[in-house]
Every structure is written in structure tokens, then in C-alpha cells.
Image (tube, rainbow, N blue to C red):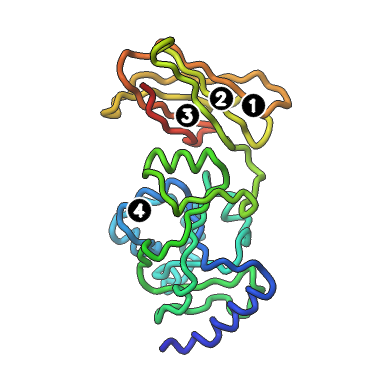
């Protein structure tokens, strides 16, 4: 039995008394979901580097070097959401992985920053954590949810809970695609809503690929700047076979759909 269990239990009680504790939380970037789902485990930073597991690391080299080897060997969890503004704001598309509460009582679980305020306290586990212990994958908006469904299939674990996230950066909140293969098979329209009014940026673009991921087209997108947060983008002259459509918003891949 882990000698830290009594302290962990007391921490959980305090969090439940003060916050709406729903389980241990790990936050990551959307781009890391593919490796996590494919491997079937949430791995520590050290294990990812040792096994050449590709992942988006928001820390720079200096920040990583300031972390002890012991902590780098552990997977890290928080008890409270929205507790690390600086790190979460660096993520292109932040996502929460919510695990079952029984993970807290893992024999290798220890508290980190045990003397800190509850918001900054962490749970460290010195082994990979299987995703079968996942309770939910939580997205900030419908657009991210739709992208996950397209890439990984629909899943009852997916939830959209905007209130758990910071919203200081502009991003696509929701979208739909209008395409009628019988009437206009060579054109479709992307309707989307954004978190804030859009400024023109050289990084706004879309790309078309065939289903073997061969690039067919790259096109920059310019918007009529206004206070509006609703926009339309028309994509015409489509080939007569299905294509993969990918849309970058401020340089961040935000939409992936198959058309046709």
C-alpha cells in the first residue's frame, strides 16, 4: 500500500469540498491524441523521448532541463481544471483527458507540490497509464469534437465543455460543410464561427489531398475583416473523385474532412 494514500485521500476530500472534482485531469494538445490512442497508454515525457514517440511538447529545452528526472519519468495529473494558464495557452488545441478517480490510488501515485494551493497540486504516477482508465476526452468546442470523430471515430467518451478552458486565443468554434454531389459536385462551402473576429493572416489556408495523401492544391484564404465571427469559404473546381480537405486557421490545423 502506498504510504501517500492517506495524504492523497485528504487532498481529494479538500478538492471535493472546494471544487467540483470530477477525477484526475491530464491536459495535452490535440495533435498528441493520435499517439496516445494508437499506443493505448498515456506515457511520461521521458518514455516518449526514449521510445521516439512523437508528441507536441510545449516546453522549451531550458524548461525541460529544469524538471527533475524523477518528474520527467512520471505521467502528470491535476485535481482542478484551468490551473495552469501559461502552459495551456501554449497549446495549439488544448484537450483534457479525464481519468477515473480510482487512478488516484495507484500504488505508484504520489503527490507533487503537496504544500501548494489545491489548484497547483499534482498527482504523479511512475508508469504509463492505460487509456482504458479514461472517463472522458474533453474538448473546448464542437469543431475539435468533429475533428476527433473524423480522425478516430465517434466515441461516447467525447464531451464538449467550453467552461473548462481559457478562451484568450482565436479559434474555430464550430463549422459545417454544404456540399451537394448531385447539383454541384465541383464545389462546396465551408461555414464556420470563430471565437473572436478574424484578422487576415498569411497562415490562413486550405489544402486538398487525394485519399492517398497526395497534395493536390494549396490556397491562401483572405477574409473581409469586420466584427463578425461567422464566415464562409467557397472551394470550387473540385476533382471528380473524393478529396481530403484540411483547413489551417492562424497556422493551426483545425478542420479535416473528406469531401465527395
Query: What is the C-alpha distance between the residues marked 2 and 1?
Result: 7 Å
- Residue under numbered circle 4: 37
Q: Residues within 10 Å of mark 3 (few under 14, many from 20)?
A: many
Image spot of residue 127 (x, y percent) = 36, 71
- Residue under numbered circle 2: 191
Classify 119 as above or below 85. below
Which image quadrant is residue 74 in?
Answer: bottom left
- Residue under numbered circle 3: 247
Between disc 1 and disc 3, the foreground one is 1
Q: Which of pointers 4 and 1 lies earlier in the amino acid sequence?
A: 4
**Mark 4, secondary structure of its residue:** helix
Query: What is the C-alpha distance between the residues marked 3 and 4?
Result: 23 Å
Image spot of residue 111 (x, y percent) = 52, 78
- Residue under numbered circle 1: 230
Which of the image's four quarters has the N terminus? bottom left
Classify 114 as above or below 210. below
Amino acid at each position: 500500500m502506498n504510504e501517500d494514500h492517506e495524504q492523497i485521500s485528504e487532498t481529494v476530500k479538500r478538492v471535493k469540498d472546494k471544487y467540483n472534482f470530477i477525477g484526475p485531469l491530464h491536459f495535452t494538445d490535440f495533435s498528441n491524441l493520435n499517439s496516445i490512442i494508437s499506443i493505448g497508454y498515456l506515457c511520461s515525457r521521458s518514455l516518449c523521448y526514449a521510445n521516439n514517440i512523437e508528441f507536441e511538447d510545449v516546453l522549451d529545452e531550458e524548461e525541460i532541463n529544469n524538471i527533475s528526472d524523477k518528474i520527467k519519468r512520471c505521467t502528470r495529473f491535476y485535481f482542478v481544471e484551468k490551473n495552469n494558464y501559461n502552459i495551456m495557452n501554449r497549446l495549439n488545441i488544448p484537450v483534457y483527458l479525464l481519468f477515473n478517480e480510482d487512478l488516484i490510488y495507484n500504488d505508484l501515485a504520489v503527490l507533487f507540490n503537496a504544500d501548494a494551493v489545491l489548484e497547483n497540486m499534482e498527482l504523479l504516477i511512475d508508469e504509463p497509464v492505460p487509456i482504458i482508465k479514461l472517463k472522458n476526452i474533453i474538448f473546448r468546442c464542437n469543431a475539435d469534437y468533429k475533428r476527433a470523430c473524423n480522425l478516430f471515430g465517434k466515441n461516447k467518451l467525447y464531451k464538449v465543455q467550453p467552461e473548462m478552458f481559457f478562451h484568450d486565443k482565436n479559434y474555430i468554434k464550430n463549422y459545417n460543410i454544404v456540399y451537394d454531389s448531385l447539383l454541384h459536385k465541383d464545389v462546396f462551402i465551408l461555414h464556420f464561427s470563430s471565437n473572436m473576429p478574424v484578422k487576415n493572416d498569411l497562415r490562413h489556408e486550405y489544402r486538398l489531398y487525394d485519399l492517398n495523401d497526395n497534395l493536390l492544391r494549396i490556397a491562401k484564404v483572405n477574409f473581409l475583416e469586420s466584427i463578425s465571427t461567422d464566415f464562409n469559404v467557397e472551394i470550387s473546381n473540385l476533382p471528380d473523385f473524393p478529396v481530403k480537405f484540411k483547413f489551417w486557421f492562424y497556422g493551426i490545423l483545425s478542420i479535416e474532412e473528406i469531401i465527395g
